[in-house]
Image: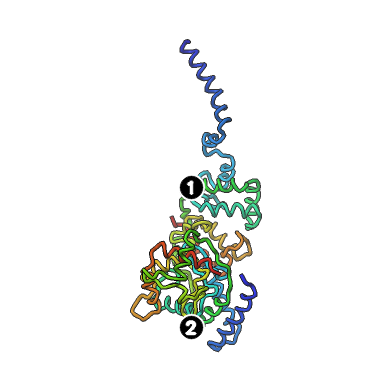
Amino acid sequence: MNVVGTRAALPAAVLALALCAGFSNASRADEFLAKVEYCKTCHGLSGQGYRGYFPMPRLAGQQPQYLENQLRAFIERRRTNPVMRNVAHALSPAMIAALAAHFRHLEARPIGGAPRGSMALGKKIHEEGLPESNVPACSACHGSDSRGQNEIPRLAGQLYEYTVGQLTGWGNVRGQGTAVDTSAIMAPTAHNLTRSQIEAVAAYVSNLP
Amino acid sequence: MSAREYRVIKRVAAAIALPVILWAFPVIAPAVAGEQDVSVRNCTWCHGTSAQGYMLAPRLAGQRPLYLETQIRSLHEHYRDNPASKQFMWGAVAVLGPQAARDLAAYFAAIPPRPANDGARDIAARGRTIYLEGIAEANIAACYACHGPNAEGLRDIPRLGGLARFYLKARLEQWGQGYHSVPGSPMPLVARPLGPDEIEALASYLSFVK
């Protein structure tokens, strides 16, 4: 973990929270810090992710716009999740923005643990896609370093099991209900990847710094 | 050779052969000795003859083997430091090496657990809600996210289902009192927002989980 980055991120996020909603008192800052700790109970003490009964995704370095979108999707039931459905509803819009800003600045080493057998295939899919299967290169949207941008999530360092779970279950979990949802962009790609291709690309991105 | 002579020779041969075989193949000695392995017996004095737990000593039967192994190591290194650990377990594991810890963990993990069923029934339903959903407004995380839907645990995340109410309650209280378990455990953070009522409810609920 980059301690300097973490220390710098906290006051920045507290300030962001204060500015967003006109907060100026210390109790609001305490409330924010308590909520950050609450997130980290599952997502890892440095936001690096954690393997519990469910794989808890890495939040460190995640794109704030993506995190905000996902938290709203949990609240609006566009994205289903047995744990987050009982978590996100208690978050105010200002809190969501402050949390997203906080995690953006955390740096943590990837926790590793992915099988190493098909890294070469994963790298190829990430960089070149699978044109014969209508799978675009991941790097085209997520960036060659896979750190994402705006509403496109960072994949670098993400837990292997989490990425596999998301790509195999995309249509059952994301874009639920009738509202228009940016998750539709990934649906055909997730659908066109085979299980072993998903495992290869998930293993590859899990090791990216 | 008379029948009587034959019987005597057979008996003498057996008396010589058995120790010779045991000496030559020490690996079968524990199998012959069955469950009377000394280190197992040293555990079951307190944890119960079928390892279902007794008083202060938690159930070991059905516990995750990797959890048992890491706790033995942590006790051995005096990192796990709650009062009962200090008083009883630091001494109990002092001579256990890594292989003995692994063997004991595998042995106890394989014994089917029986739930303690000693919680208060009237608050168990509240405990179940906290276990499965947490309380987002109070920053209480759902235990289920790590310990699983039936509190069965996995890897080094312990089984909680069926442990005794007294033990569960003491452990949940101890996180907030500054005691340690293993380095990097999220539990001090997890347990911090739990109040006495929530701890009672969780301990009661979990005591009934099969």
Q: Is residue A189 above or below residue B30?
A: below
What label does residue B110 carry, if any? 1
Residue type for callout 2 = Pro
Q: Residue at x 46, y 57 (%)?
A: B152
A150 lies above or below A161: below
Q: Residue A73 is drawn in which quadrant?
A: bottom left
Q: Whole-percent x and y of residue B191? A: 55, 66
Give a yes or no on whether discs 2 and 1 share a subunit.
no
Local SS, label 2 = helix
Q: Are marks 2 and 1 in contact (CB under 8 Å)?
A: no
The three-letter code of the residue at mark 1 reads: Ala
Q: Mark 2 = which residue?
A: A93
Seen as rendered, the residue at the extreme left is: A178
Crowding around mark 2 (Cα neighbors within 10 Å: few <14, some 14 to 19, many 20+) is some
Residue B79, relative to residue B176: is it above or below? above
At 65% from the left and 54% from the top, the residue drawn is B77
What chain does badge 2 belong to?
Answer: A
- Where A207 falls versus A179 (above or below)? above
Residue B44 in sight: yes
Asked whether A203 or B39 is in front, the reply is A203
Residue situated in front as seen by the camera: A179 or B125: A179
Q: Kindly report the distance in space between the C-alpha atoms of the residues bearing marks 2 and 1.
A: 49 Å
Whole-percent x and y of residue A155? 49, 71
| Residue at the image point whose x is 52% and y is 51% from the top | B65
Compare residues B142 and A191 and report the one nearer the observer: A191
- Give me the chain letter of mark 1: B
Q: Give the quadrant of the C terminus of chain B.
A: bottom left
